[in-house]
Image (spheres, rainbow, N blue to C red):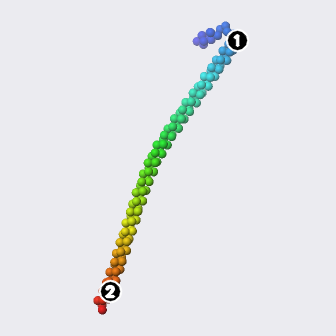
Amino acid sequence: MSWAVEEWKEGLSPRVLQKIHELESQVDKLKKERQQRQYQLETLEAALQKQKQKVENEKNESAILKRENQSLMELCDNLEKAKQKISHDLQVKESQVNIQSGQLNSCKKDIERLEQEVKR
């Protein structure tokens, strides 16, 4: 079959044949270069897709971490409020204990005084 492709070249001058050969060589070279560039393009597109997927995964992870952080902040706020309430309740109870302790001391003094009066 290659003889049919070459048949049209019969009768051409050596100079023209040389030019045709140079052009065919150039076409082959350009085809190889185009294949290489196509391969590079496909490789770069694959790398781009991989990077896009990585960015998307990181965005998703970031969103998850933001939600978790928000949840933890709310939990901390709730714990702080509970701590303040417990602290306030403790102060109230300590105050009540102090009052009752004072009343107890007063009652003890009254008892001692009454015991002294009874002894007299």
Q: Residues within 10 Å of mark 2 (few under 14, many from 20)?
A: few
Residue located beneath label 2 in the image? 113
The kind of residue tagged 1 is: Pro
Image height of 18 relative to 97, above or below: above
Q: Residue at x 58, y 25 (%)?
A: 35
The kind of residue tagged 2 is: Arg
Residue 33's disc is none
Q: Residue at x 66, y 15 (%)?
A: 20
Q: Which image quadrant for residue 118?
A: bottom left
Distance of label 1 from label 2 (alpha carbons):
144 Å
Quadrant position of the C terminus in the picture: bottom left
Check the image and name the residue furthest to the left.
118
Q: Position of residue 41 (x, y in %)?
A: 56, 30
Q: Secondary structure beneath disc 1?
A: helix
Residue located beneath label 1 in the image? 14
Image height of 16 relative to 49, above or below: above
Q: Position of residue 16 (x, y in %)?
A: 68, 12
Q: Residue at x 58, y 30 (%)?
A: 40
Image height of 73 relative to 87, above or below: above
Q: Earlier in the sequence, mark 1 or mark 2?
A: 1
Give whichever of 65, 110 is nearer the camera.
110
Decide if residue 45 is on the left or right side of residue 94: right
Q: Position of residue 31 (x, y in %)?
A: 60, 22
